[in-house]
Image (spheres, rainbow, N blue to C red):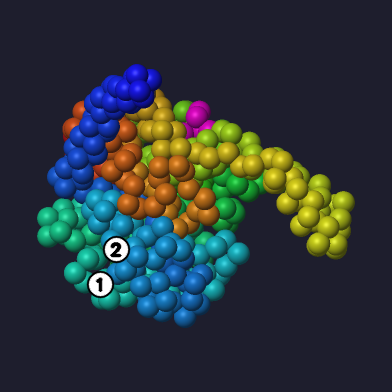
């Protein structure tokens, strides 16, 4: 009886000790949600339009009706609301394997998906073309919907196509995707031009003239350097993280981060596990090497290849990236570039695995709470959530209007 009472007392004492931590975390989450209500969380990159196309080549919105929970996706309206998303750049991605007219046609079809989303769910989504639109739509309780083109191959080397896509609502273009375009080098292809060609510089200038944001995610460091030299408006990285934390080509080197204060641009930290965690990135490299080795060993014997690769996976389980690592990237960019140059670009529905704690669009407040736990002030968090991107948009609009950057 005495031992039982002692154990009961110890359990009660442990609960008392743990309670403040639980309460503190709950307080941080509530504070985070309050900040999401004050300013729009602007996410730089969501691939729902391509996820829909993958589910249904006919692009029927009812095949992934996001008015209701869709467990196979990272994105639906209930979870967008739960995550406090105030504005979303919807990626109108098409793969680099599509070229020429095929790429243009497919991109237009992706833009059409975004417009149909707003017609299908007008109580939730509304097209935003300017920073003022984002603020107005957010104030009405809707999600401001912006369009981002992912890859310069989508314009088929035509400034006229670029201008028409701007007319249809596109407000950023990623200069390259995974492969070079004829006028710019990608981060994940063999260097061909050492950055931008003369026509590539013309593309950047035309984007400045239009008021379309120059997105440098996916580009090589030389392309980043050239774009920063040429652009008279702030650039963005719609979904990239810090290369000093995870050394992969898709992340932003410190040399580029140090240039952002002069340009005014923003890195929108992404949740791609291999871009957050060096362990995940290293595992991916080992997997790629092993896949090539086993392919050479087993040739056309697919069953033997699958068995051998399965055994390797069993012996080498993939590590998991975490929410805390996403915050580590934000910390690093803050140290190198400053608080005015950070945003969020989750890449949900464009990734096959997710970090622990950032499983879908409902989890943004958990990241906000982590930043508060790390002693970011409310004003600093508001900048990261959306005020930095709104500033960039306004500055790009000023350049397009011929007024130059605000002092």
Q: Nearer the viewer, residue 21 or 285?
A: 21
* First to last magenta residue range: 241-246
Image quarter hosting the C terminus: top left
**Of all residues shown, which one is farthest toward the front?**
1
Disc 2 designates what residue? 77
Q: In the rendered view, does 222 fall on the left or right side of 232?
A: right
Where is residue 28 drawn, in percent x and y? 23, 34
Where is residue 378 drawn, in percent x and y? 19, 32
Label 1: few (<14), some (14–19) or many (≥20) C-alpha neighbours in 10 Å: some
Where is residue 389 drawn, in percent x and y? 27, 45
Q: Magenta segment, principal secondary structure? A: loop
Image quarter hosting the N terminus: top left
Numbered disc 2: secondary structure: helix
Q: Closer to the N terminus: mark 2 or mark 1?
A: 2
Residue 200, compared with residue 23, is above or below; it is: below
Q: Residue at x 48, y 76 (%)?
A: 56
Where is residue 161 drawn, in percent x and y? 42, 68
Q: Residue 232 magenta-drawn?
A: no
Q: Nearer the viewer, residue 283 or 241?
A: 283
Label 2 close to label 1 by CB (< 8 Å): yes
Q: Residue at x 25, y 24 (%)?
A: 16
Q: Nearer the viewer, residue 8 or 202?
A: 8
Q: Residue at x 20, y 52 (%)?
A: 131
Residue 316, compared with residue 136, is above or below; it is: above
Q: Residue at x 53, y 40 (%)?
A: 320
| Foreground label between 2 and 1 | 2
Instruction: Tell me, yes or no, if residue 271 can be seen here.
Output: yes
Inter-mark Cα distance, 2 to 1: 9 Å
Disc 1 designates what residue? 121
Q: Quadrant of residue 113?
A: bottom left
Q: In the rendered view, does 321 fall on the left or right side of 337?
A: right
Numbered disc 1: secondary structure: loop
């Amino acid at each position: 009886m005495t031992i039982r009472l002692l154990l009961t007392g110890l359990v009660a004492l442990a609960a008392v000790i743990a309670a403040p931590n639980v309460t503190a975390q709950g307080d941080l989450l509530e504070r985070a949600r309050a900040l999401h209500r004050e300013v729009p969380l602007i996410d730089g990159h969501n691939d729902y339009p391509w996820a829909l196309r993958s589910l249904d080549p006919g692009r029927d919105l009812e095949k992934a009706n996001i008015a209701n929970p869709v467990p196979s996706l990272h994105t639906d309206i209930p979870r967008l609301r739960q995550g406090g998303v105030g504005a979303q750049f919807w990626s109108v991605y098409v793969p680099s394997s599509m070229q020429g007219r095929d790429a243009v046609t497919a991109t237009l079809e992706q833009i059409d998906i975004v417009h149909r989303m707003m017609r299908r769910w007008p109580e939730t989504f509304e097209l935003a073309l300017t920073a003022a639109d984002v603020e107005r739509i957010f104030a009405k309780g809707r999600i401001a919907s912006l369009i981002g083109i992912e890859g310069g191959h989508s314009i088929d080397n035509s400034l006229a196509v670029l201008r028409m896509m701007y007319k249809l609502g596109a407000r950023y273009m990623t200069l390259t995707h995974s492969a070079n375009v004829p006028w710019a080098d990608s981060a994940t292809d063999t260097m061909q031009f050492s950055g931008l060609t003369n026509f590539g510089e013309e593309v950047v200038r035309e984007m400045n003239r239009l008021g379309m944001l120059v997105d440098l995610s996916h580009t090589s460091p030389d392309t980043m350097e050239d774009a920063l030299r040429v652009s008279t408006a702030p650039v963005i990285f719609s979904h990239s993280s810090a290369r000093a934390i995870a050394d992969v080509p898709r992340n932003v080197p410190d040399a580029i981060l140090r240039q952002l204060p002069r340009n005014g641009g923003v890195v929108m930290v992404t949740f791609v596990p291999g871009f957050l965690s060096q362990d995940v990135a290293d595992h991916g490299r080992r997997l790629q090497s092993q896949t090539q080795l086993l392919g050479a060993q087993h040739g056309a014997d697919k069953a033997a290849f699958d068995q051998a690769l399965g055994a390797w996976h069993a012996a080498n389980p993939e590590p998991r990236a975490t929410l805390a690592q996403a915050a580590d990237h934000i910390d690093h960019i803050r140290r190198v570039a400053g608080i005015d140059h950070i945003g969020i670009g989750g890449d949900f529905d464009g990734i096959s695995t997710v970090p622990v704690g950032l499983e879908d669009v409902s989890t943004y407040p958990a990241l906000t709470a982590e930043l508060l736990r790390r002693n970011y002030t409310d004003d600093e968090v508001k900048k990261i959530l959306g005020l930095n991107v709104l500033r960039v948009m306004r500055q790009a609009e000023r350049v397009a209007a011929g007024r130059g950057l605000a002092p």
